């Protein structure tokens, strides 16, 4: 026992001598946000402002942002069945278990053990010249090798595991936000293509009626074969568009099924884009309030904190590592006397490992940890800058898409009136069929462009909701 005390005293003396050679302790400090204090659109026109009192995206649940009940049900199916999101959730469980394992290293491990053995000692090997059976029976508890965490190595490992776990949780939240936005965009794309298909079908019906009218007037000698062939070409062009949009709708459904992770019931598929009020308005807020609440940025910050903790692990390598091992119980060669007082036994085995010379390995590992910390800082700042650009792009598009949609709607209204007048003049015999043909083509193109703009505007709102941190 006196030898153990002497070893501890000498080791502690060496400890204080080595502590002056260890690197200084580094504590985490959040890097300065490398973006401007306000959103920048880069446009001369001011950004469209949301309605007064509009909530922030991060405060608005996806069930409140999407007002279409069928879309809500489709998103809910995706959250239950999507395999990517399921893998992200399983990864959270795995990292959580790893954190629990690392946290348990702070405490000693105590185990109960019992055992016995018997073996025959032959006459030639015995001291009294007689053979006999020797028994050895033990029972007790023992503590596995337990590290005294005087210099924070185990605590740093636990902190690193905790930050990795928190980062995995935020990564799962980011995956959920991306999935919600992807499902919504897929749903809206299918709705827009179904509107385009319905418009192509209505145009085909109108073109067929016009073709029959031109055919009858040609038979009476009023219109020419050229007019008839022009009317026929419009019918065939509409048929081409119907085939194209029918195929596109089928592709949209396949893509939506993949995102959802299961076939979407027909009654939940969109019939069209519906009203422009299908999505609620949101407030952009300030970058400092928004960006630091995005799950992907929070995950990057947790990774940065884990890198700081790893520096603590590398720093602790400059200090001695003290471990304790001990146990107690009973040991006897006779099973009947195993639990008697004179059969008591105990062990105590402290160990101190002090670094003396390693050819610079510890310093190199410490430098690696510092470089990894600096890399994590750069990744954190890049995540913020990327998020700032995503929000700025979406805000810039929001105002201009709304202006384009309003202008396109006015254009479609004018083209509808132009087509009506052209058709009336043709039926009255004032103009030939060419004016009707031009008006029909212009109207159809304008209507399809309006559908595309509405789809883009709604998709932009979904993207803005996503990049502002909504979707939880």
Image: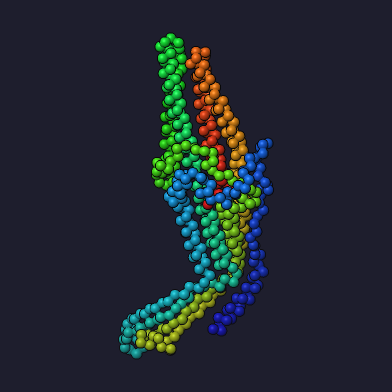
- Residue 424 sits above or below residue 447 on the image: above
**Residue displayed at 55% across by 38% down:** 457
On the image, the x and y values in percent for residue 193 come to: 47, 34
On the image, the x and y values in percent for residue 147 come to: 54, 72
On the image, the x and y values in percent for residue 261 come to: 42, 47
On the image, the x and y values in percent for residue 188 come to: 49, 39
Question: Who is closer to the viewer here, 89 or 58?
Answer: 58
**Residue displayed at 51% across by 78% down:** 349
- Residue 77 sits above or below residue 444 on the image: below
**Residue displayed at 53% across by 31% down:** 450
**Residue 106 showing in the rendered view:** yes
Asked which colour scheme the image uses, the reply is rainbow
**Residue displayed at 56% across by 84% down:** 2
**Furthest residue toward top:** 221
Q: Quadrant of residue 333?
A: bottom left
Indicate the quadrant containing the N terminus: top left, top right, bottom left or bottom right: bottom right
Question: Who is closer to the viewer here, 466 or 140?
Answer: 466
**Residue 372 showing in the rendered view:** no
């Amino acid at each position: 026992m006196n030898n153990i005390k002497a070893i501890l005293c000498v080791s502690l003396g060496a400890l204080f001598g080595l502590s002056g050679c260890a690197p200084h302790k580094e504590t985490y400090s959040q890097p300065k946000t490398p973006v401007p204090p306000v959103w920048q659109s880069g446009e001369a026109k001011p950004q469209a402002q949301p309605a007064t009192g509009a909530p922030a995206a991060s405060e608005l649940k996806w069930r409140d942002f999407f007002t279409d009940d069928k879309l809500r049900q489709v998103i809910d199916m995706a959250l239950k069945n999507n395999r990517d999101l399921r893998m992200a959730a399983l990864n959270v469980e795995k990292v959580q278990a790893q954190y629990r394992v690392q946290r348990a290293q702070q405490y000693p491990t105590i185990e109960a053990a019992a055992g016995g053995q018997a073996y025959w000692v032959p006459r030639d090997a015995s001291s009294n010249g007689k053979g006999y059976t020797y028994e050895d029976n033990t029972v007790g508890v023992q503590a596995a090798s337990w590290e005294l965490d005087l210099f924070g190595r185990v605590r740093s490992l636990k902190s690193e595991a905790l930050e990795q776990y928190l980062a995995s949780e935020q990564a799962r939240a980011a995956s959920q936000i991306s999935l919600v936005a992807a499902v919504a965009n897929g749903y809206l794309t299918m709705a827009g293509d179904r509107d385009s298909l319905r418009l192509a079908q209505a145009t085909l019906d109108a073109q067929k009626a016009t073709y029959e009218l031109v055919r009858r007037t040609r038979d009476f000698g009023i219109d020419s074969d050229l007019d008839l062939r022009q009317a026929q070409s419009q019918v065939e062009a509409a048929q081409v568009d119907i085939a194209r949009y029918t195929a596109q709708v089928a592709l949209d459904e396949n893509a939506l099924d993949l995102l959802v992770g299961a076939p979407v019931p027909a009654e939940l598929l969109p019939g069209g884009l519906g009203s422009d009020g299908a999505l609620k308005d949101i407030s952009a807020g300030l970058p400092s309030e928004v960006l630091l609440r995005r799950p992907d940025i929070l995950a990057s910050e947790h990774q940065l904190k884990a890198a700081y903790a790893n520096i603590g692990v590398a720093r602790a390598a400059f200090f001695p590592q003290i471990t304790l091992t001990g146990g107690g119980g009973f040991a006897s060669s006779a099973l009947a006397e195993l639990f008697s007082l004179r059969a008591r036994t105990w062990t105590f085995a402290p160990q101190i490992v002090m670094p003396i010379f390693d050819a610079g390995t510890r310093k190199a590992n410490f430098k690696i940890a510092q470089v990894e910390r600096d890399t994590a800082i750069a990744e954190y700042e890049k995540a913020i800058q990327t998020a700032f650009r995503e929000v700025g792009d979406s805000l810039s598009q929001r105002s201009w898409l709304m202006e384009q949609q309003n202008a396109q709607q006015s254009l479609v209204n004018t083209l509808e009136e132009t087509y009506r007048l052209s058709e009336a003049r043709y039926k009255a015999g004032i103009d030939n069929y060419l004016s009707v043909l031009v008006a029909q083509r212009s109207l159809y193109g304008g209507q399809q462009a309006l559908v595309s703009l509405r789809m883009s505007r709604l998709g932009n709102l979904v993207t803005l909701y996503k990049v502002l941190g909504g979707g939880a």
